[in-house]
Amino acid sequence: MRILIQNGRVLDPASGRNGSFDILTEDDKIIKVEEKIDAEKAGAGKVIDAGGCFVMPGLIDLHVHLRDPGLTHKETVETGAMAAARGGFTTIVAMPNTKPVTDDKQKVSYVHNKAKMNAPIHVLQAGAVTKGQEGKELADIEGMAEAGAPAISEDGKSVMDSGLYREAMKIAARAGIPVLAHCEDINLVKGGVVNADEHTEAMGYRGISNAVEDIIAARDIMLARETGVHLHLCHCSTKDSVRMVKEAKEEGLFVTAEVCPHHFTLTSEDIVEGDTNFKMNPPLRTKEDVEALRQGLKDDIMDVISTDHAPHAASEKLKGMDAAPFGIVGLETAVPLTVTELVEKGILTPMQMAEKMSYNPAKVIGVDRGSLEAGKEADIVIINPKEEYIIDASCFASKGRNTPFNGWKVRGKVKMTICGGRIVYDDSKK
Ligand SMILES: NC(=O)N[C@@H](CC(=O)O)C(=O)O
Ligand SMILES: [Zn+2]
Ligand SMILES: [Zn+2]
């Protein structure tokens, strides 16, 4: 089966193509990219008109919580993957804070096998750093890497024992996989639920200061220097995280970093009192931090936009600001928030969007994706950057509806997601 995508604006960081091109796929591969491809001569079984749309390599999300196994009332491999396809993603990396924790090769394979059977897109399972994420004993990092884990991560917490973490980094470096670092000094959190500032204090909430993140980010960069591991900082939220990543890169360290849409869109001033859809970890910070994150993305200090898709059941989120779990869903709002907040405002070029949502994340985990060149896997997303619509959480494919963006008027609609040459999401067929 051949699919021809015509008239779109191709944005392909790998080749530098940025303009009107047609793309022809056959089975699971891209076979031709040219200025004009004739549908009949090409033998196309399906012709897609992408006029007015961005055509990018399928998006890659390095930070997703699928909750499978053990927390499948929140999400499953299948529902999370469907949400990803609907959001324009063709590859996602699942975090290991499942129940039980994904900390050995059998558990990594469980998710990979389930995804191969039932998921419309590629799902890669990251392995935990320590057994049970207890921070005491290292997990079988080598074994998990052999089973195809693209990275290790203790996401949800930091490994507070620096000696143990350094050992993990050495093993990851040998195995050739990155460490995805959640930076949080738990001893400084002290029951905090939102950013520590005067706004949140006025609402009577306990705060999480920037130092909670910055101290561990600094430590992890020092350990990356010592071990040579590829350190990738997750969900950066502070201005000093951006500064430290900049300095690490200037020094030539193997450090990359990601920013989530909620962190470049909202500040703690946007928090609606009592609405736990504004509670996530790290928390929404100040205007100064948001400005630094945006500038860091613009200047290519920050490499990746990831979602930290963290679905929770409505009943759990109703427990009030103190007791509700941290986290919001993100797979189905990442594209419109990136288009509306960054591309439309001239902070990122469309090409930078393709870099940060596909090309760069592919490089972080070392997969041969994120490219629209002939011969590559036919993972493609078509986005209409001008289409305006209202975010409606009740339409999400995810089981999670916990988003502060419900009802927002946005621009940038995912029109079609193609994975391995198959149409896995078509906005015209709802
Ligand atoms: N981000 C969150 O607020 N929550 C995540 C954990 C994490 O990413 O640290 C979760 O698993 O729910
Ligand atoms: Zn985290
Ligand atoms: Zn996370």
Image: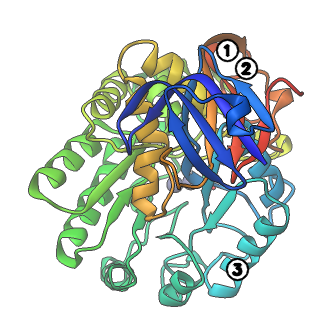
Q: Report the residue at 23% width, 49% height from top.
A: 245
131 and 33: which one is in front? 33
The residue drawn where x is 79% and y is 48% is: 1
Question: Which residue does the numbered mark 1 point to in the structure image?
Answer: 408
Q: Earlier in the sequence, mark 1 or mark 3?
A: 3
In which image quadrant can residue 67 be found?
bottom right
Residue in front for this viewpoint, 275 or 235:
235
Q: Position of residue 149 (x, y in %)?
A: 56, 75
State the image coordinates of residue 256 (x, y, percent, origin top left): 32, 54
Callout 2 amino acid: Ile
Q: Residue at x 41, y 35 (%)?
A: 196
> Quadrant location of residue 65?
bottom right
Gap in Å between the C-alphas at discs 2 and 1? Answer: 5 Å
User: Which image quadrant for residue 84?
Assistant: top right
Q: Which mark is residue 109?
A: 3
Compared across the picture, whether 27 is left or right of 161 comes to right
Q: Nearer the viewer, mark 2 or mark 3?
A: 3
The residue indicated by pointer 2 is 391
Report the front residue among 188 and 113.
113
Q: In the displayed structure, does residue 190 sit left or right of residue 396?
A: left
Q: Residues within 10 Å of mark 2 (few under 14, many from 20)?
A: some
Badge 3 amino acid: Ser
In terms of sequence position, does the residue under pointer 2 or pointer 3 come before the other?
Answer: 3
Q: Is residue 209 visible?
A: yes
- What percent of the width, then of the height, locates residue 176? 37, 78
Q: Where's the C terminus, which quadrant?
A: top right
